């Protein structure tokens, strides 16, 4: 008899949970579809560290990443999960005795369902996630002025942008789970805001972001020239606003009216650039935090000095850390996926530039937004200026230290970035 009652209790409790779950699926808010910042129209078309963050901001992001607090994982911009409360209060459901009247139980469950619904309403009002739909397949780009439409250079750069956006959209369309997404403050935490020219820039470390921050500061009137802005001012001055610093209304308004852009770089080249910067030069953060953990885990017979300082990490050890599903220390923005940093399947970027064609792409973008004619993208190297930039040749030298299996796994790790931004396989033996 006791087992029968217990079984009945479990069934009723499960049924009530299912009712609550179904009830939670009802949309609480309706937010209009996101639109790009500036429309493009050519008449015949149908409308259709290098980069370092401030200490507090970087520590916050690293903490979120290392602790697993962040809601977006490796492919989360392709498959984000909805940010809704998941813990159900069960205190009211527990009874001092299993033997109770079925009618009282049903009544109690209805009351709990109402209370949970009210709590969820309060949660939504407080957290205010931004619900958006994936944009249509129409390719929208920033406006090209009528006098520039006969300029072969601008038209060529426009067509390149159109193709990049097409490939990015097709990749998103192929791998996305559904057509509804939630934008949380985490998704826009790497986006910098320039209100005067209405620009949103997603920071991708080791892809020219130090100089892009200088450009944004000049556009905002904080400096007269990019040459006047020192490294520490760029990274630690906190002069630029981040999109996650605005309220729900401010985030939504800017996502729908500002020109959104990001610049990316060949993934292996970006990775080697980050390794050289953080581990081959003195660094009072990456050596003790990442270096010590990497050497301790992956180096056989490590010296006491290496274990104490964390200096001298080898590229092969760094790759072992990167590919380890049980990393001794969390992920970092300098070698994380662009797909995760900027959520390009979630946020409809109007302009996608590449580090490999930085000068043309950057100056084309500045022309599109109507920036001052004397403002061009700076060419100088922000850190270690006497050292050669990381090139394809240098990248191949570093990856030659790895086994074919490690190269393949590294390619698999960045596969979505290679696919989404149409980069070729860096080695012939990759599949």
Image (spheres, rainbow, N blue to C red):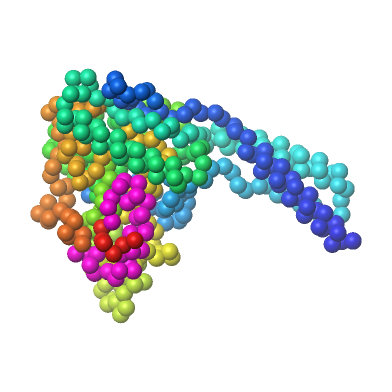
Q: Nearer the viewer, residue 163 or 107?
A: 163
Quadrant (top left/top right/bottom left/bottom right) for the N terminus: bottom right
Left or right, 116 with respect to 238, comes to right
Q: Which residue is most to the left?
A: 386
Which residue occupies 42% across, 43% down? 172
Locate residue 329, reporting x and y percent: 38, 62
Image side of residue 31 versus residue 212, left or right: right
Q: Nearer the viewer, residue 335 or 396?
A: 396
Instruction: Give how far across and how far down residue 53 sits, in percent.
Output: 30, 46
In the image, the segment drawn in magenta is 397-425
Residue lying furthest front: 44
Residue 419: image location, x then y, percent: 34, 49
Is residue 402 in the magenta section?
yes
Q: Quadrant of residue 196?
A: top left
Task: Check the image and report above or below for 405 versus 370.
Answer: below
Observer-nearest residue: 197 or 245?
A: 197
Q: Main secondary structure of the magenta part?
A: helix
Is residue 149 placed above or below 332 in the rendered structure?
A: above
Identify the image quadrant of the C terminus.
bottom left
Coordinates of residue 158 in the picture (x, y in percent): 24, 32
Q: In screen coordinates, is 199 left or right of 111?
A: left
Residue 236 seen from this side: no
Residue 12 appears in view? yes
Q: Residue at x 21, y 23 (%)?
A: 149
Q: Residue at x 84, y 62 (%)?
A: 3
Q: Which residue is pictured at 26% across the width and 48% down the height?
A: 265
Whether residue 401 is in magenta: the answer is yes
| Total tally of numbered discs in the picture | 0
């Amino acid at each position: 008899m006791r087992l029968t009652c217990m079984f009945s209790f479990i069934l009723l409790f499960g049924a009530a949970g299912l009712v609550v779950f179904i009830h939670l699926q009802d949309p609480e808010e309706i937010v209009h579809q996101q639109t790009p910042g500036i429309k493009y129209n050519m008449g015949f078309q149908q409308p259709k560290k290098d980069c370092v963050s401030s200490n507090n901001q970087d520590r916050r992001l690293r903490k979120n990443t290392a602790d697993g607090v962040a809601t977006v994982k490796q492919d989360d911009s392709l498959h984000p999960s909805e940010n809704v409360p998941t813990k159900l209060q069960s205190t009211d459901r527990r009874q001092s005795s299993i033997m109770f009247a079925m009618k009282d139980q049903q009544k109690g469950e209805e009351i709990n369902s109402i209370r949970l619904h009210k709590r969820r309403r309060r949660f939504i009002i407080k957290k205010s996630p931004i619900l958006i739909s994936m944009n249509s397949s129409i390719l929208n780009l920033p406006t090209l002025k009528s006098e520039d439409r006969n300029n072969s250079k601008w038209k060529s750069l426009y067509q390149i942008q159109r193709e990049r956006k097409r490939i990015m959209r097709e990749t998103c369309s192929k791998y996305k789970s559904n057509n509804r997404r939630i934008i949380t403050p985490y998704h826009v935490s790497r986006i910098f805001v320039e209100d005067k020219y209405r620009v949103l820039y997603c920071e991708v470390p080791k892809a020219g972001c130090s100089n892009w921050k200088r450009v944004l500061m000049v556009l905002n009137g904080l400096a007269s020239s990019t040459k006047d802005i020192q490294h520490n001012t760029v990274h630690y001055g906190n002069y630029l606003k981040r999109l996650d610093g605005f309220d729900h209304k401010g985030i939504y308004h800017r996502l729908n009216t500002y020109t959104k852009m990001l610049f990316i770089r060949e993934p292996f080249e970006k990775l080697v650039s980050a390794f050289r910067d953080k581990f081959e030069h003195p660094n009072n953060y990456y050596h003790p935090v990442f270096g010590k953990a990497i050497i301790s885990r992956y180096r056989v017979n490590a010296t006491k000095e290496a274990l104490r300082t964390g200096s001298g990490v080898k590229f092969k050890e760094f790759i072992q850390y990167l590919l380890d599903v049980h990393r001794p220390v969390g992920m970092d923005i300098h070698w994380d996926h662009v797909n995760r940093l900027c959520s390009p399947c979630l946020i409809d970027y109007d302009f996608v530039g590449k580090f490999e064609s930085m000068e043309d792409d950057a100056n084309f973008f500045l022309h599109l937004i109507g920036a001052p004619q004397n403002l061009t993208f700076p060419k100088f190297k922000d850190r270690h200026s006497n050292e050669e930039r990381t090139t394809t040749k240098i990248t191949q030298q570093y990856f030659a230290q790895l086994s074919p299996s490690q190269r393949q796994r590294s390619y698999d790790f960045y596969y979505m970035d290679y696919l989404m931004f149409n980069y070729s396989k860096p080695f012939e033996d990759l599949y």
